[in-house]
Image (cartoon, grey):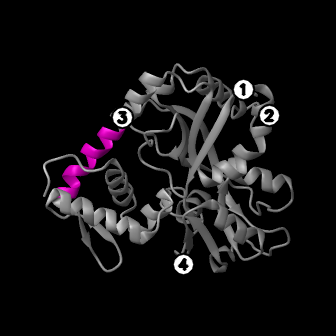
Amino acid sequence: MSSGLPPLGWLRTFEAAARNLSFTGAARDLNMTQSAVSQQIKALESHLGRPLFHRRPRALELTEAGITYLPVVREAFHTLTRGTRAVTGARGNAVRVQCNLSFAVQWLAPRLARFRRAHPDVALHISTDLWEAREMSEDTDIEIRYSLRPSDRVGAQFLWADRYYPVCAPGYAVTLDSLADQPLYDCTNLLANWAAWAEDQGLAWPDPPVIYASTFLVTLAVAQSGGGLALAHDLIAGPLIQRGRLIAPFEHRAAMPESYYLIVSPQAGRADGARQFADWLRAEISPDSAG
């Protein structure tokens, strides 16, 4: 055990491993090998004189020391980031945007050319997660979060409330009476699910099996291929319906408990590029511009 500070790289590796609860996930995030991650964690544990993880057969679990150390490490990185920005000044018009993968591909990407034409001097860096992070990463300026209303402490601004409904490939034969007998797909961990839609529709729902994925990109791809029905909402399914790749076989739409929110980090709130992107996003996603 050493009383000195451990190398910064070891701490970054620990934070990534704790965030993923996986050495493999940390290796992916940090562009390292899994072996290198494991070696750095062992070196850090040796430096501290105590284990930070319980190595389970299929997952990691933080020890009591790891639980205590993680917020300290994260706050240290936050402090370093804020201090570096204070010393170097604003990063010009570079804006780091975090959003989920489905939103980035289905809604944001087709509109980026319009943003580029309006703001050619703003350099966007877009980061996506299969499932939205509960906290903004320390180097993110703007987050578009799809969830129940976030805590007031993050300063989230409401962007868009959507409706959800089943979608399938054109020509797919389905009726309300046969719906429960079809292959059904959905995104995990949403309150806007098949049972809730059926209840809102007034169906007697026998709770059939549903196949779940961590992103709508997977479930919508299955629906487009004719493999079954997926639940979707206007913001991500609308363009596919307009292009004739999906149809909504039933008229009923249910209001989603989840909505889209805009979160601007405090350090980016006064930066020109972040403000321009946030203003553009609010205008682009408004009812008059959506679709």
Residue 12 x/y as whole percent:
37, 51
Q: Are marks 3 and 1 in contact (CB under 8 Å)?
A: no
Quadrant (top left/top right/bottom left/bottom right) for the C terminus: top right
Circle 1 SS class? loop
Please identify the dominant SS of the magenta region.
Answer: helix
Q: Label 4 sits on what residue type?
A: Pro
Mark sitting earlier along the chain (1/4): 1
Label 2: how many residues lie within 10 Å, few (<14), some (14-19) or many (20+)?
Answer: few
Residue 93 versus residue 64 in the image, above or below: above
Query: Which numbered circle lies on residue 114?
Result: 2
Check residue 209 in the rendering and tell me which mark sits there, or answer none. 4
User: Label 4 neighbourhood size at 10 Å, few (<14), some (14-19), many (20+)?
Assistant: few
- Asked if residue 225 is positioned above or below residue 291 in the image, the reply reads below
Of 101 and 206, which appears nearest the observer?
101
- The answer to whether marks 2 and 1 mark residues whose Cβ atoms lie closer than 8 Å is no
Mark sitting earlier along the chain (3/1): 3
Residue at the spot of label 3: 80
Locate residue 239 relative to residue 233 in the image: left or right. Answer: right
The residue shown at (13%, 49%) is 3
In three-dimensional space, the C-alpha distance between marks 3 and 1, rounded to whole angstroms, equals 27 Å
Q: Is residue 176 visible?
A: no
Looking at the rendering, the stretch of residues picked out in magenta corresponds to: 65-77
Which three-letter amino acid code belongs to the residue tagged 3?
Answer: Leu
Q: CA distance from mark 1 to mark 4?
A: 50 Å
Q: Residue at x 55, y 58 (%)?
A: 130
Residue occupied by mark 1:
121
Amino acid residing under circle 1: Asp
